[in-house]
Image (spheres, rainbow, N blue to C red):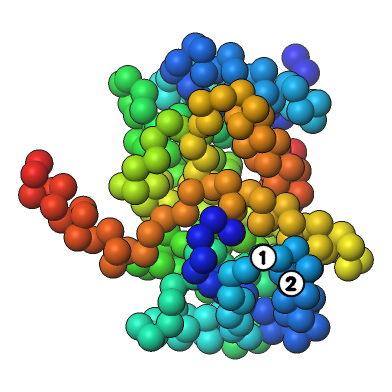
Amino acid sequence: MPCAKPILLIEDDPVDALAIRRALNDTNVGDTIVHASCAHEALAFLHSCRSCRPTLILLDLNMPGTDGLTFLQVVKGDPSLRDIPIVALTASDEARDIARSFDSGVAGYMVKSPDYKGLLETVRAIQHYWKLNRLPASLT
Amino acid sequence: MRDSRPVLLVEDDSIDAMTVQRAFRELKVTNPLRRATNGEEALAYLGDEANDKPCVILLDLNMPKMNGTEFLRIAKADPVLRRIPVIVLTTSSEERDVVESFRQSAAGYIIKPVDYRNFVEAIRTIDVYWTLSELPLEKTEDAHAMCQANTAD
């Protein structure tokens, strides 16, 4: 099985997931995308394939079951996963969510734009920034 | 950057510090740039109530007295300072530096481009990203709100 390092998108809303995937493709950066529709599914993926750890995680916060913030704390508390950068991509612009996310080690907090053009601009900035970054060799 | 708070540059090399300042001016980044020349000085700046807390920190790694890795470890263990995003900006491409920085929740690890034009482009990319990204308030600013929310719970 080929092991292209993907971006892991964690998003429970199918419409939002479709729009974000479309934006990630429309920027033509060529990232592979793995979609998990809940934190549980994302954790199962992270533990199932040690050799294809994602290069970046895009994380929704408001999800049923384990919410995004709890997922963030679990990953950042796991020595085998904590070096994976996680960017919040959420509808919430509440100061409390922003503060708790940064307190828990998020590497960016983007509010989902309601229109596609804005979403594309956000996704492009995320991809551009993380391409500039040097990431641990295990993620690239 | 998203708001008008200062950016704290932790950098011992005067020429690199001037290059960042010049790139800010060229890109019309209006945030005041504060500078500390090592980790100790940065912690002293952050601990001084008279200073505005920065919205983000740009951190060199190889510095005398207290290096960037040590500073990052202390800042991220501090309940007040840990929420400030720290972007490593360094010449080091050593794998152990990269891994350790991300393990300590660095919000980026960018190798300083040697060429000035590329340096400006790197600062532009950082600025665009951290203008789109929400930034946390200072701990003291949201303490009141948190306290009220907890009482309501």
Do marks 2 and 1 share a subunit? yes
Characterize the local packing of mark 1: few (<14), some (14-19) or many (20 or more) Cα atoms within 10 angstroms: some
Q: Amino acid at mark 2?
A: Arg
- Residue B34 image offset from top left, x and y in percent: 58, 80
- Residue B27 image offset from top left, x and y in percent: 75, 63
Above or below: residue B151 compared with residue A72: below
Give the quadrant of the C terminus of chain A. Answer: top right
- Residue B37 image offset from top left, x and y in percent: 63, 85
Report which residue position mark 2 lands on: B25
- Residue B17 image offset from top left, x and y in percent: 73, 79
- Residue at image location 78% in from the left, 68% down from the top: B26
Tell me, yes or no, whether the two marked residues, 2 and 1, touch with CB atoms within 8 Å.
Answer: yes
The disc at residue B21 is none
The disc at residue B29 is 1
Front-most of residues B45 and A44: B45
Give the quadrant of the N terminus of chain A. Answer: top right
Q: Amino acid at mark 1?
A: Val
Residue lying at the far top of the rendered structure: A14
- Residue at image location 72% in from the left, 52% down from the top: B125
